[in-house]
Image (cartoon, helix red, strand yellow):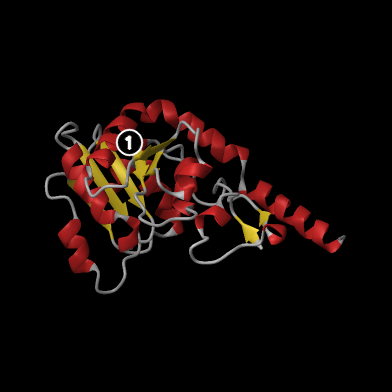
Amino acid sequence: TFQLHDHTADAVPASYTLPAAKLVTLRHSSYLGIYGHEQTAPEARKELGIEAGHHVVGFVGQLRRYKGIGTLCAAVDVAVDKVSDLTLLVAGAARHGDSAWLKEVMPKRARTVRWYRRVPDRTLANWVCAADIIALPYQRVLNSGSLLLAATYGRPVIIPSNTALASVYSGESWVHTYDADTDDVSPLAESIISALGTARSDSDAARQYARDWTPYDMSRAYLRILERVANA
């Protein structure tokens, strides 16, 4: 059985048991070389109609309630007190019937740029590169392609501290965590403000992480696993 990180078994015992002897770890790679080239933030923001010089926090991925989008929107409306030019960028496919919910939870005070459909591959880089940071306040999460997509384009990420992902990326300077064991959105708002302040210095570490484990590296590791099994 393949797992994308070594914390998988520890995260799922309430649902099922994964026998250690049958587990093989194949780390989730970045998306380097898969989507478009990295753009500068001004270039990407011009494409999306975002004013130059604004601070931008982004969410890119399927828009699902369990991903904490409502929490993110509320936190942005708190953070705007200290970052007056804050803009929230939200892009991803929404389920049919969720338009009313999304309209209800969107920030009331901060600017927003929204796209409630699947983001085409050719424009995916625009949405990530237009953000200073990517916030992923998932209520339940085991793995995240959006996190590695952010790293691919040198964007720091915010995730809840009480998740398996926080354990996986512990010690990575470009991954920020916040206390999610409360209904108060202030910890996330404070993390947004803090991450914006270090986004430029964190971006190189994110890019390096993406370069250190590419889709090619993952494919070669997969091949070695298959060869080992075949020769067992």
- Name the residue at 46% across, 31% down: 173
Q: Residue at x 51, y 51 (%)?
A: 35
Residue at the location (57% across, 56% down)? 9
Query: Does 84 sit left or right of 32 as displayed?
Result: left
**Residue 170 visible at all:** yes
Q: How many marks?
A: 1
Rendered position, 156 above or below 15: above
Q: Is residue 63 visible?
A: no
Q: Where residue 87 sits: x, y (%)?
A: 22, 42
> Looking at numbered disc 1 in the image, what kind of residue is underneath it?
Pro
Q: Quadrant of residue 84?
A: top left
Give the x, y percent position of residue 131. Answer: 34, 41
Q: Quadrant of residue 230?
A: bottom right
Mark 1 lies on residue: 42
Kindly state the secondary structure of the residue where label 1 is placed. Answer: helix
**Extreme residue toward the left, this view:** 109
Q: Position of residue 145 (x, y in %)?
A: 48, 53
Q: Quadrant of the N terminus?
A: bottom right
Q: Is residue 109 left or right of residue 163?
A: left
Locate the C terminus by quadrant. Answer: bottom right
Q: Nearer the viewer, residue 42 or 76?
A: 76
Identify the image quadrant of residue 174. Answer: top left
Q: Residues within 10 Å of mark 1 (few under 14, many from 20)?
A: some
Give the percent coordinates (x, y) of residue 136: 36, 49
